[in-house]
Amino acid sequence: MTPPDATALGEFLQARRARITPQEAGVTLYGDRRRVPGLRREELALLAGVSSSYYTRLEQGQSRSASVQVLDSIATALRLNDAERAHIHSLARSDGRRPAARRQPVERADPALAELVDALGDVPALILGRRSDVLRWNPLGHALLAGHLDAESPLTPRTRPNMAEIVFLDAHTRSLYTDWRTKSRTVVGSLRIMVAQHPADPALASMIGGLTIASPEFACLWASHRVQACSATVFELDHPLVGTLTVTQQTLRSATNPDQALVTHTAAAGSPSAEALTLLAQIVRTARATGTTRTTRTTRTGAPNVAHATN
């Protein structure tokens, strides 16, 4: 059990230590009975080249002065990947300064990113803020990911869709991903990184707390302390209007506003998935020409049905 005074860094270290077995770490066993499958604190300390007492204090939140070298040694012992390694450094910095929670200004889409999203045309794209709020999407991005929602909803802060929330709490979005579990792990892994970078954002903490209460699946994934940097990920979608298609989701951070991300969805040229995106673009143009803003999900048996729209 995590000690009540453990820091975010300590919680992460304990979670990772529990997931690496002695065999994976190269620790020799001598027939002793173990209560847990993961590494013991003293075993990890030995692998990292630090004293057992120091590592225990670090994990329990009683020491917040770990050097870069010590953190790197622990990361190597835990076999962390690049994203996880960067994550423990972010956690160590945030634990060390213990910033006071402060109200953050309302997020606005970066003008340069907004211009780019609009210019992408037939490439589904959207801008996500630090809390996974949709700050802007183009018509095809809306139709691909959330056609059942109001296309204008990102324009007002109180009506903005939150991608993390709809992945876990919205039945339409859940049914969109054929491998929903992979998508859900990606969402949580990305949120973990953002929380470490912004420990003083009360709105972000509130959103995480709300999801933890509302979704047992989210709560379980959050407790695992897995992190995942989103760059390029392939997802299969079961779209209600154009059928099954495979898209590559790429996430690009703004150089001037790194809290915001441009997320695009593409398909291999000439593939059935690319044809499905072209069909969806045609549906969107037709809907816009008739002055409609929201396409409803239709029951599909076999081939996709022709879309209909509501105002």
Image (cartoon, rainbow, N blue to C red):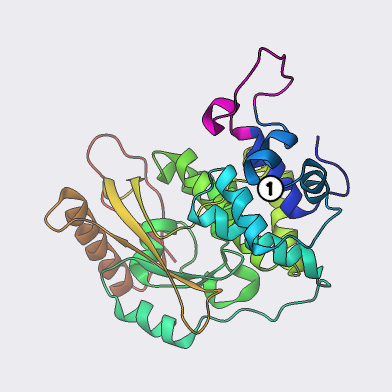
Instruction: Find residue 4 and report its horizontal and vertical position in percent.
Output: 88, 45
Q: Nearer the viewer, residue 226 or 187?
A: 226
SS of the residue under disc 1: helix
* Magenta stretch: helix, strand or loop mostly: loop
Looking at the image, residue 127 sits to the left or right of residue 274; the answer is: right
Residue at 56% over, 51% down: 227
Q: Is 311 in the magenta?
A: no
Vertical order, 191 against 285 (above or below): above
Find the magenta span and give its range: 19-37
- Kindly indicate the quadrant of the structure image that contains residue 126: bottom left
Q: Is residue 200 visible?
A: yes
Q: Which of 259 and 20 is in front in this view?
A: 20
Q: Is 26 in the magenta?
A: yes
Looking at the image, residue 307 sits to the left or right of residue 12; the answer is: left
Residue at 63% over, 49% down: 74
Instruction: Find residue 286 and report its horizontal and vertical position in percent.
Output: 26, 68
Looking at the image, residue 51 sits to the left or right of residue 74; the answer is: right
How many labels, in total?
1
Instruction: Find residue 284 and report its horizontal and vertical position in percent.
Output: 30, 66
Q: Can residue 220 be seen in this view?
A: no
The residue indicated by pointer 1 is 12
